[in-house]
């Protein structure tokens, strides 16, 4: 009799465990589903990473990427904004791209669900080899234009996205530690005696400093990429604060991240001081990095890691 009771209890325990596992599996699946980026999220990511970011004091930033214009604003009301947008170029009629927000707003956003993101295509009539102007602003019913901003293509300096949206992005999408762990596990780590350590993974170049001081960040970074099959050099110089990343797992590390053009052949990087010139510099061919099995991360930062 005791054996029968024991067997019944074991069966109940096994069934309970299976149900618990199923529940956990479902919960994990639900979490994973929440973290999935939509196709539009991915397109916005790429535009922010590779495009020209233009900050706007009126709260609607612009990204110029390939032949597209993205306008990005934090959602503050239920109704999307309405805009006028004119593209002008010498010898060309004004291209009027005025639009109602509901017409051009990207839908199915998960990562950027707290933003209205509008996308427009620049007309084929615009010749990108020549300078052009963009005049855009917001229209309010009964008031007309409430502000406008001019952008001159020939006066725009290379300007990269500065991570200003992180605080308003759904938290499950900006856990940088997940990305960093993947880069450590599968990327190419270059330990350096001076300047910053480098980590290369999937076109990303990470600049990492252990036991750093604030003055290590004051000097501007230069980053020059030579593109495959050309003599063209892509200038990606930056200030540390512009591309810094915060890690909860490695809070004492200074980390910045830049994305290299997909057709990069090699890069040179370092820091320059106004009076002294370059204070450290290195250059690498990407093939030499990728084919070097010795460039692996060997837990160099474990003594500053928080579990």
Image (spheres, grey):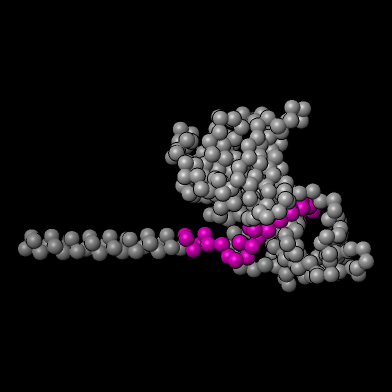
**259 horizontally vs 52: left or right:** left
Q: Quadrant of residue 247?
A: top right
**242 horizontally vs 255: left or right:** right
Q: Quadrant of residue 274?
A: top right
Q: Position of residue 43 (x, y in %)?
A: 64, 62
Residue extending furthest toward the bottom: 103
**207 horizontally vs 123: left or right:** left
Residue at image position (42%, 60%) is 28
Residue extending furthest toward the left: 1
Quarter the C terminus occupies: top left
Residue extending furthest toward the right: 91
- The answer to whether one can see residue 139 in this image is no
34 magenta-colored:
yes
- The answer to whether one can see residue 26 in this image is yes
Residue at image position (68%, 30%) is 279
Residue at image position (88%, 63%) is 88
Total marks in image: 0
Q: Nearer the viewer, residue 193 or 266?
A: 266
Q: Quadrant of residue 118?
A: bottom right
Q: Position of residue 75 (x, y in %)?
A: 69, 59
Q: Position of residue 92 (x, y in %)?
A: 91, 68
* 200 shown above or below 90: above
**163 horizontally vs 129: left or right:** left
* 227 shown above or below 103: above
Q: Which residues are magenta?
A: 31-60
Q: Position of residue 163 (x, y in %)?
A: 66, 48
57 magenta-colored:
yes
Q: Nearer the viewer, residue 239 or 150?
A: 239
Residue at image position (60%, 45%) is 285
């Amino acid at each position: 009799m005791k054996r029968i009771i024991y067997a019944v209890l074991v069966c109940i325990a096994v069934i309970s465990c299976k149900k618990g596992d199923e529940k956990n599996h479902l919960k994990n699946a639900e979490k994973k589903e929440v973290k999935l980026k939509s196709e539009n999220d991915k397109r916005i990511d790429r535009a922010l990473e590779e495009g020209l970011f233009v900050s706007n004091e009126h709260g609607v930033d612009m990204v110029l990427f390939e032949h597209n214009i993205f306008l990005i604003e934090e959602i503050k009301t239920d109704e999307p904004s309405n805009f006028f947008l004119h593209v002008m170029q010498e010898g060309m009629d004004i291209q009027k791209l005025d639009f109602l927000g509901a017409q051009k707003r990207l839908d199915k956003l998960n990562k950027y669900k707290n933003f209205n993101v509008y996308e427009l295509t620049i007309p084929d009539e615009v010749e990108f080899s020549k300078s052009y102007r963009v005049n855009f602003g917001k229209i309010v019913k009964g008031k007309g234009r409430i502000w406008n901003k001019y952008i001159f293509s020939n006066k725009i300096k290379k300007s990269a996205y500065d991570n200003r949206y992180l605080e308003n992005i759904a938290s499950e999408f900006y856990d940088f530690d997940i990305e960093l762990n993947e880069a450590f596990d599968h990327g190419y780590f270059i330990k350096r005696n001076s300047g910053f350590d480098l980590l290369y993974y999937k076109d990303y170049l990470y600049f990492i400093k252990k036991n750093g001081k604030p003055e290590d960040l004051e000097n501007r970074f230069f980053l020059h990429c030579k593109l495959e099959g050309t003599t063209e050099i892509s200038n990606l110089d930056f200030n540390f604060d512009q591309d810094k990343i915060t890690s909860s797992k490695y809070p004492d590390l200074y980390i910045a991240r830049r994305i290299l053009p997909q057709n990069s052949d090699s890069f040179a990087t370092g820091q320059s001081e106004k009076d002294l010139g370059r204070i450290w510099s290195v250059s690498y061919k990407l093939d030499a990095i990728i084919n070097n099995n010795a460039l692996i991360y060997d837990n160099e930062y474990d003594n500053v890691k928080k579990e």
